[in-house]
Image (cartoon, rainbow, N blue to C red):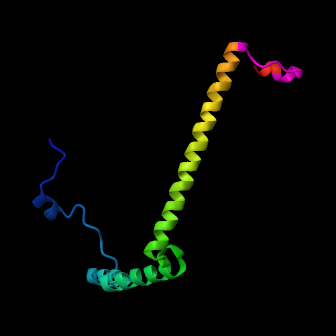
Amino acid sequence: MPDFVKENELVKSGVGEQPRQGNADPEEGLAEENEERKTLRDQLKESREYQENLESRNSSYKLDEKSARFYDQLKTKAKEDEMKAKDEEKEQLVEVQGLEKKSGPAKSNNPHWQSLF
């Protein structure tokens, strides 16, 4: 015999119904929930106020187009310089590793350092 119950049998038997507590009106609960929610208009107003506050505090909003381009160029140059420095460091590392392979590991007077290699 299947464990499933048809919808019309469910209504007849009262299975799954939750007992009501007191004289609680189901519409009352929805009204309270709607009072807590903000209207779309209020949400948009708060969003605009937040954006205006952010613009007044954040200096990047205050920059004109010429200044913004200048700072973008500075950032780009700084990134390029950083990349060049990393590339040079990699090249030096490859050179040192190549020299170590040719001549063997570096000799040191400190026995502790010799145990690391």
Residue 26 visible from this viewpoint: yes
Can residue 23 be seen from the camera position used here?
no
Closer to us: 116 or 71: 71
Q: Could you tell me which residue is drawn at 49 percent across and 76 percent down? A: 63
**Depicted 71 relative to depicted 20: above or below:** above
| Image quadrant in which you'd find residue 41 | bottom left
Question: In the rendered image, which quarter is residue 12 located in?
Answer: bottom left
> Residue 84 magenta-drawn?
no
Q: Position of residue 42 (x, y in %)?
A: 35, 86
Q: Is residue 86 left or right of residue 14?
A: right
Q: Quadrant of the C terminus?
A: top right
Camera-nearest residue between 14 and 116: 116
The image quadrant of residue 6 is: bottom left
On-image quarter of the N terminus? top left
Residue occupying image coordinates x 51% and y 82%? 56
Q: Is residue 106 magenta?
A: yes
Q: Where are the magenta residues, as a range?
A: 103-113
Position of 31 with respect to 95 (left or right) is left
Residue 86 is situated, as x and y percent measured from the top left of the image, at 59, 41
Which secondary structure is most common in the magenta stretch? loop
On screen, 71 above or below 98? below
Above or below, 114 relative to 43: above
- Residue 115 point in image, percent of width and height: 80, 19
